[in-house]
Every structure is written in structure tokens, then in C-alpha cells.
Image (cartoon, rainbow, N blue to C red):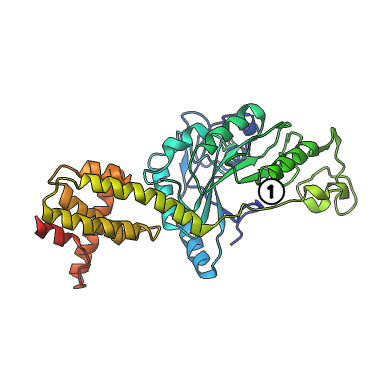
Amino acid sequence: MKGTAINWCDNTFNGWEGCTRVSPGCDHCYAEARDARHLTEPFSHWGKGASRRVMSDLKWREPLKWDRDAAESGTRPRVFCASLADWADSEAPSGQRERLWALIRKTPNLDWLLLTKRAGNIRRMLPPDWGVGYPNVWLGVTVENRKHGLPRLDVLRSIPAAVRFASIEPLLEDLGVVDFSGIHWAIIGGETGSGARSIDTVWVEAIIEQCRAQNVAPWVKQLGKVPSDSGAELVVLDEDGSQSGNAEDWNLWPEHLAHLKVRELPSVDRDELTRGRHEADLGRIASELGMLAAGLEPEEAAVELKLREEYISAERKLFLTRLERGQILAAYKALYGPLRKWSKFLRAIGFARRTAYACTVRHRNEQDGATAHERPRAAPDTRLRSSR
Ligand code: SF4
């Protein structure tokens, strides 16, 4: 499903377009220039207060197809989000980030690469059920220089995630000593496009060496449009022998740079990821639900215990189906709503009230639909209602 020229991912997804510059890495933002070129509205989508453009429903549905194809082919495509925006932009269009998380949950066969320059926003913009990280989300930050980039790594390593990565692109200076602890993958690249700033091969070498020493997978994307080699101009010849200077294609690099041709991926043990997320998270949830159940009447306590086991074992399957989640939430609502423990229950399982409401309504509608078509009802919540 290769749908992009970016060599470290298989496709890109943008739920919306538009952003605000935050650091020197944005100076020649490709997406901003593209927005200006293709503007169909009388205003730009860039800058503080500028409204972002939400992509069509058709675009939003594309990852569902990629996910189905991936399931059929047994592959795990990497999807970069977002190439025309910043997923952690505080001016993202209302409701679209929640929509993105819902899409990510619906596409467990895709690995979503969420890259941002707004590291300080990441934690508060993660979904309520993030726990130790979704197993299909890789979190990344841009590291273009020491001043802005290295502090972003400090924030990133403190956030639980299946994979954490640094996008060291465009590399604008020698990064010096880099602490890669907690980071799994480093993409390295120079600047491309008009006005591109230079990258030096010595800086790239230094990063690769530090990756090797700290068990991080390096991926050298390209050396940009105007690379230098130990401070001198890097001579790159085109296939016809003319000097181009363009080092985006590593087949054109001179022989002595062969050691920079490295493209490695982090090793990801999916079983371990799944176990890690669930066992840590589910242990905490089970114990909080146990405490919440204290004081229930014996009959209610027996129902709750059964329900809790059902919930934990369904969650262990990684992503509950909509029906399963709706059923269980509706049953707990029937038990804890009248006892005024519903909010505490939602806090224990790390669920937002609005999301829980949507799940239970959807469940009720599905039940109504099933009844209308004379299909058997599959919901366990009736047991609870009759138990009170
Ligand atoms: S954060 Fe990314 S999308 Fe936003 S202005 Fe900077 S380079 Fe462009």
C-alpha cells in the first residue's frame, strides 16, 4: 500500500490541514507552502487563529481500507500522521483529534506514527484510555537542533508508548551528546526544497554512532538538497555525470559515504506490547473495580464480580468490539447509576463520560435494530436490571 514518497512510512494520513510555526525546523515548512499553492478559500490555514481545513469523510475512511488490506496480507503498514499539520496542535479543529483516536482504535493492523513539535502538549492530548500506550501507536518528536529538539526528547521519554521515535529532520546543526534513553528509533535527514539549509555528514555519523551505542535503530532518510561533507561542499553527481548537489537519493552518494546508508527499524515484540499494556492496566482496573464493589448487597456483588471478569477478559483481547464495550458499559450503568457510583466507575476504567454515553447509546440502538429485525438479543445488561 505504498502511497507516499517518504521512505520511512507506507502512507500518510491528515485528518486536517493547517498549523502554526513553532521552531526553526518550521522555517521552510513544506506543508505551509503547499497550502498557499492550493488555497481554495480566501484565507490561509497557517498561523495563530487561522482555521484549519478538515479533510473529507472520504479521506477519513481511507485508513479503514488500509487496515482491511493489512489484515488480509498479514502486514503492518506504517502510517505517518500528520504530514500537513501537527496532531498535537492546540488549535486543531474541534472534535477532530478525538475522531483520530477513534480511527486509530478501529485500525489495529496499522502502526500509526504520530509526530509532533509540540512535545509539551502530548500528555494532555492522549485519549483517556491510553494507559501504557496503544500498541499500534508510535509517538515521535522532531529534533532539528539542540535548543528546541533535545528538550522534546526529555518529554517524550517520560510518556508511555509502544515505540518512541526522534525525527531528526531537518538536521540543522551538530546535536552533540544525545541522550537516547527510552527512545527506540531515530530518523535522520537533511532539508529539501527551496532555501534548504545544509546538513553535514559528520553530524549524521555522530548520531548513528550514538544510536549504535544506545541500542536505537537509525534510519538515514536522505542528506538533503545542499549537504556538506566535513565542512566542505559534498559533491553529488547525477546519473548523467553532471553535478547536482542533491543528496536525496543515496544511490548517488559518493562511495566513501556508504557507511551512512543505514535504514533500520526498531524491533517490536507485538505479543509483549499487548501483554504489557493489558496486564499492567488491567491489574490496576481490576483492583479499583474491586474497591468500588465494596458495600454492594451480596446479590449485586455477585453480578458485579461476574461482570468484572467478563470486562477484564474482553479487554485482554486488546480492542473490544463496539458491541462488547457497549454491552458491558450498559450493564455497569444499570448497576452503578442508581448507586451514584457511575462517575467513579468511569474514572476507574479511564473512560470519558461522553465516550461512555456514546457507547451505551450505540449499544441500545444496536439492540433496538436487532429487535426490529427479530434477531436474538445479545446483551447481558437485562440480567442486572432484574437483579435489583
Ligand atoms: S509543526 Fe510541522 S506542519 Fe506545523 S508549521 Fe512546523 S513544520 Fe509545518
Q: Amino acid at mark 1?
A: Trp
Residue 321 vs residue 25, the one in the foreground? 321
Q: Disc 1 marks which residue?
A: 219
Residue occupying the point 49% across, 61% down: 67
Outermost residue toward the top in this view: 147
* Residue pictured at 65% horizontal, 44% vertical: 186
- 68 is higher (above) or lower (below) than 105: below
Residue name at image x 87 percent, y 47 percent: 256
| The furthest residue to the right | 241
Residue 340 image position (x, y, % from top left): 15, 42
Queried on whether the Cβ of the residue with tag 1 lies below 8 angstroms from ligand 1, the answer reads no
Image quadrant occupied by the C terminus: bottom left
Q: Could you classify mark 1 by the number of other residues whose Cα lies within 10 Å: few (under 14), some (14-19), or many (20 or more)?
A: many
Dot 1 falls on a residue whose secondary structure is strand
Q: Quadrant of residue 269?
A: bottom right
379 sits to left or right of 148: left
Taking 27 as reference, is 305 left or right? left
Residue 80's spot in the image, x, y percent? 56, 49
State which image quarter holds ligand 1. Answer: top right
The structure residue drawn at horizontal position 42% and vertical position 35%, both measured from the top left corner, is 124
Q: Is residue 353 visible?
A: no
The quarter of the picture where residue 306 lies is bottom left
Q: Nearer the viewer, residue 298 or 4?
A: 298
| For residue 220, side relative to residue 232 (left or right) | left
How far across and down, in percent of the image, does residue 87 sit? 49, 41
Q: Is residue 113 above or below residue 147?
A: below
From the image, which quarter does the N terminus lie in? bottom right
Is residue 198 shown left or right of residue 160? Answer: right
Whether residue 308 is visible, yes or no, is yes
